[in-house]
Image: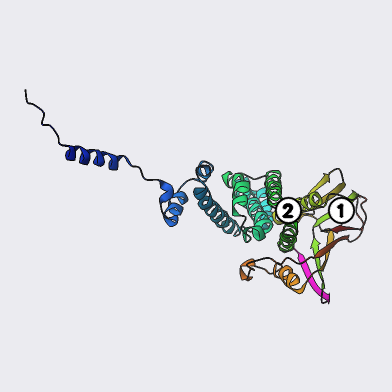
Amino acid sequence: MKRRRATSGHERQLKSSRIHKTSVSLNICELPTEMLAKIIGYLDINNHKSVRATSRRLRDISDLIIVHIFRKNFWNHTTCNCTTHAVFKAINRQNQQWTEVWNLTRCNCSMHAVFKTIQQSTEVYLRSGFERIFSSCFLPILFHNPIKKVCDEKLAKCLLRFFDSIERQFDSFDMQKCRLLHSMAMMNFFKAFKKVSITLSDTNFHKWQVIVDLKGPWLGALWMRSPDQRSSHRNLFNMLSCMLFFNIAGQSFRRVCESSDEVYVYGNDGNERKRVTRTTFAFTIRASQEMCLLFRSCLESDLKNINWPTTLPKQQFYIDLDIIHAGTNSWGFPRSHHIVI
């Protein structure tokens, strides 16, 4: 039987250090940002929820990737031509084999309306650094299989959760910035409607008017009292997003929005109606020239062409909105009503 050779203290130290080195594991969060972005980018969108709960750094990278995925899906669905629905519908009446083609085209148009509504509602906030809230609120939309139809109720819930989360980021001292972002988002919102006419006028140095004429979408107040301004703005934006969704999809709908302070009726006249409803949204803005130029820039066709300010102006501003309806309506609401934004 061979005797084991006794090891010296120096050899034991080398052996223990070698074992210690091999047992050290690499932390993935220590990798460079570019490498982490590529790794997380290969993950399925369904795995982002677990990745976001790992660390703050991985959540920040996941936010950027989710926004990128959303923009990619948005541009993929902008190629959808919703006007072909009527053609496919007519062909479907004569030949049953076009049923699948018609359903697929209708689905693509619905997804286009979803991504377009989200893009117009959130673009101002994304350019202001709210990627994290966007990712957490609209991840369920990206979870959804694009082959299936995303209902407007699910979209409305995601938008409502998004605006609630935005408002919670501001305290009473920063509500001026919250109002400014909300007003800029609304200016950016109207230009996405079909058959829209936007007229700008400068009445004087500190007063500016925006007249938006819509054909198809309509909104009226059956009953109002002095409401909570924040909840009123949230309800207004929620109704406008629903109107935009059906307007892009070319579908008709009618609904009632009821709260403790107000009752609204709103809807959209689809392409099948010969005489569509006309509604005018008249904004009167009293603000500094710097703010008026910022509001005007939100009406540009593409926000990428705007030199976005590093810091938003902090001056006071006032916006009045008058909603005017052309002709009579069957709901019985007045022809015009006034909202302070």
Q: Using the image, determine if residue 184 lies above or below residue 221.
A: below
Secondary element at image label 1: strand
Residue beneath the point at 76% across and 67% down: 315
Drawn side of residue 189 relative to residue 79, left or right: right
**Residue range highlighted in magenta:** 195-205
Residue beneath the point at 70% across and 49% down: 168
Q: Give the total of numbered labels.
A: 2
Q: Nearer the viewer, residue 56 or 63?
A: 56
Residue under circle 1?
220
Q: Which of 3 and 189 is in front in this view?
A: 3
Q: Which of marks 1 and 2 is nearer the N terminus?
A: 1
Q: Nearer the viewer, residue 112 or 335?
A: 335
Quarter of the rendering occupied by the C terminus: bottom right
* Residue 145 visible in the displayed image: no
Q: Which amino acid does label 2 sit on?
A: Ser
Q: Distance between the residues labelled 1 and 2?
A: 15 Å
Residue under circle 2?
241
Q: Verify whether residue 134 appears in magenta.
A: no
Residue beneath the point at 66% across and 58% down: 125
Q: Verify whether residue 196 appears in magenta.
A: yes
Q: Where is residue 135 in the image (x, y as percent from the top left)?
A: 59, 50
Which residue lies most toward the front here? 9
Instruction: Determine the image quadrant of residue 270.
Output: bottom right
Q: Which amino acid does label 1 sit on?
A: Gly
Drawn side of residue 88 relative to residue 330, left or right: left
Q: Nearer the viewer, residue 91 or 132?
A: 132
